Amino acid sequence: MLKTLKTLKTPIMLAAVFSASALFSGCTKKTDDQSGTAQVAAVKSEPSGAQASEIVIGEYGSFTGNEATFGQSTDKGLKMAIDETNKAGGIKGKQIKLIALDDQGKAEEAAAVVTRLITQNKVVALIGEVASSRTLAAAPIAQEHKIPMISPSSTNPKVTEIGDNIFRVCFIDPFQGTVMAKFAFEHLKVKKVAILRDVKSDYSVGLADYFIKKFKELGGEVVADESYQGGEMDFKPQLTKLKSKTPEAIFIPGYYTEVGLIARQARALNISAPLLGGDGWDSSKLFEIGGKDINGSYFSNHFTTESTDPAVVDFLKRYKEKYNGETADGLAALGYDAGKILIAAIERAGEAKPELIRAEIAKTKDFVGVTGKISIDSQRNATKPAMVVKVDGNVNRYVTTITP
Amino acid sequence: MQEFIQHIINGISLGSIYALIALGYTMVYGILQLINFAHSEVYMVGAFAAYYGARLLNLTDKPGYGTLVILLVISMVICSVVGLTIERFAYRPLRKAPKLNILITAIGVSLFLQYGGQIVFGADPKVFPNVLEDSTITSFGAVELRSFDVAILGVTLFFMTAITYLIQKTKVGKAMRAVSTNHTVASLMGIDTNKIIAITFIIGSSLAGVGSVLVGMKYPKIDPLMGTLIGLKAFVAAVLGGIGNLGGAVVGGLLMGVCEEMVVGYLSSTYRDAFAFGILIVILFFRPAGLLGRVSQEKV
């Protein structure tokens, strides 16, 4: 028995190694083909760097995989920004060339495609990614090669701490806590709030902490601070406890999956205080799970299609025309803004050199984007307003804009 | 005081669900001395069976007792089939193998169903159909007594009584008790042990189906991993009450639910499970066989 096993083992292992390497080379080859064509075009058009007739910008994102919609929306927004500039004559007569590579929603793949964009395609700047985990995987590479990179929508504070070449055009997690505290105190005019946070999620804990800090600063009172764990389904004990403290509003910075159930159980216990939350609520499933009980709750978001701002209305109209009647989501709007800020920076830099572009992105101030007026602060984060929306069935009604 | 009463009501409502699922664990254990870890996944499949059944029959938004009964039947039937299949193909071939092998198989089946479920049903949460309208039956002061809470407790007590009757008063029940005492001797007495074990699985699994519909009704969000946490708690409830003992499963489930509520209500919501399980450890320390369990003599 042992002998047969041994004799069997070698060929099996060999076969495994072969098939693995075949698989591996297959993969690399495929991606090489994709970027190969792009690379040829880039090399052809870019014989000596800045003197070329084209400016090459790289994008990486999850165009396939679980979060394919994230990458695709961002890409549509970014493409729109670039096409508009190219149609208007480009930057100082030079057309912008976008090379977009798929990271399949995997952090290791993000690192690989960014390396390729920098070393083979010689991009002068990078745009990406949506998910913080993938931006965090790619950012050190961009930093090492001193290529400026703008993340359209990674909200984790750590992203821009990687180095001075990494920027973002969205707000960071803690900011949303501050926003909702301001909204509760100044807009809803409540003085007593309760917190219900998901202790398992850094995002939720961060938002809750900053909410409490700001709300106390403004002179409000936090009457209860309870927690739950993502994945639970029964929140009645926490809610019963909160109810006895009679809060005027409850801040629940969790994800839509639990928030829907929390809303139902809160109403079942006859708690009528409005519920507040962050962008983790932004899903069409929120209303499906929460039903009518979630109506009338508020959460902060990056963007709203309900905005009356002419820049946003115009953007939505142009997006619809370009993409067969599709409505732009927040990620597309952020992709568009990231593109526009980068283009403006290249224009100001005069020359498409990474270090000049980096310096100009850092100087961005009061840039009017579709997601609000954006300034880049000394930490390379965007200082910008957040929208507060109210849940009303399947629509999130725009309520107000809160500036930092 | 009002808060305390509300916590008790919440706890009993939650505990009833634990009890219903704990009954399934305890029955299978009683007869096979096997902890059927796949039970929590049978429960998950039951929830999805009701979900798809409601969509197929166009009942997703027609709350009423008729809908509740139809979904209960669908879920119970599908759960029985799944439970029976697991028994037939995963456990029966190992009947003569060491107990540990069957236990590992049970864990394997459980994982298979969890991850298979994510492929078949998708990993994102689904919204359970609207089965019954929840309404306040009575509210005194700040205390709310909801119809769901009463319905869940009622259904649990009904099934517990029905099963106790089945086991104590019917011929099948007698056979089940016999098999539970000694397989070999029972088969010598002309009892078809395989058939009796299959019946046990059918009953236990259909209880999981009932539990899944009640949970879906009260917490209308279902996903393929929904069984893990509730299954673990129901299992602990069964152990707490004395595994193998039907009344014990119900007592254990209710105690577990109330314990959890009280921990959150008066201690800390962050350490909900830690405290709740801690209390259980203390109880088991003083009563190792569980609250209603008998200390069994080692059979040689």
Image (tube, rainbow, N blue to C red):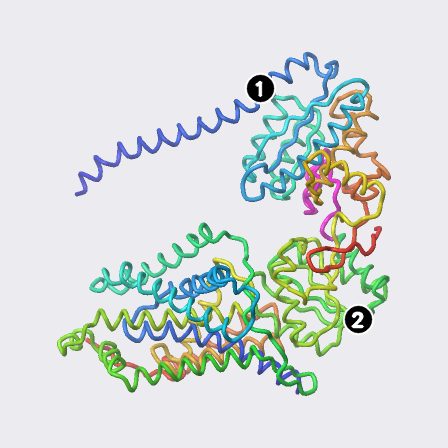
Q: Residue at x 76, y 42 (%)?
A: A381
Q: Is residue A226 above or below residue A70?
A: below
Q: Is residue A63 left or right of residue A96?
A: left
Task: Count up the numbered dots.
Answer: 2
Q: Can you identify the residue that label 1 sits on?
A: A37
Q: Can you identify the residue that label 2 sits on?
A: A192
| Amino acid identity at mark 2 | Lys
Q: Residue at x 37, y 69 (%)?
A: B205
Could you classify mark 2 by the number of other residues whose Cα lies within 10 Å: few (under 14), some (14-19), or many (20 or more)?
many
In front: label 2 or label 1: 1
Q: CA distance from mark 2 to mark 1?
A: 61 Å
The answer to which of A109 and B126 lies nearer the viewer is B126
SS category of the residue bearing label 2: strand
Location of residue B186 by image quarter: bottom left
Q: Earlier in the sequence, mark 2 or mark 1?
A: 1
Q: Is residue A378 left or right of residue B294?
A: right
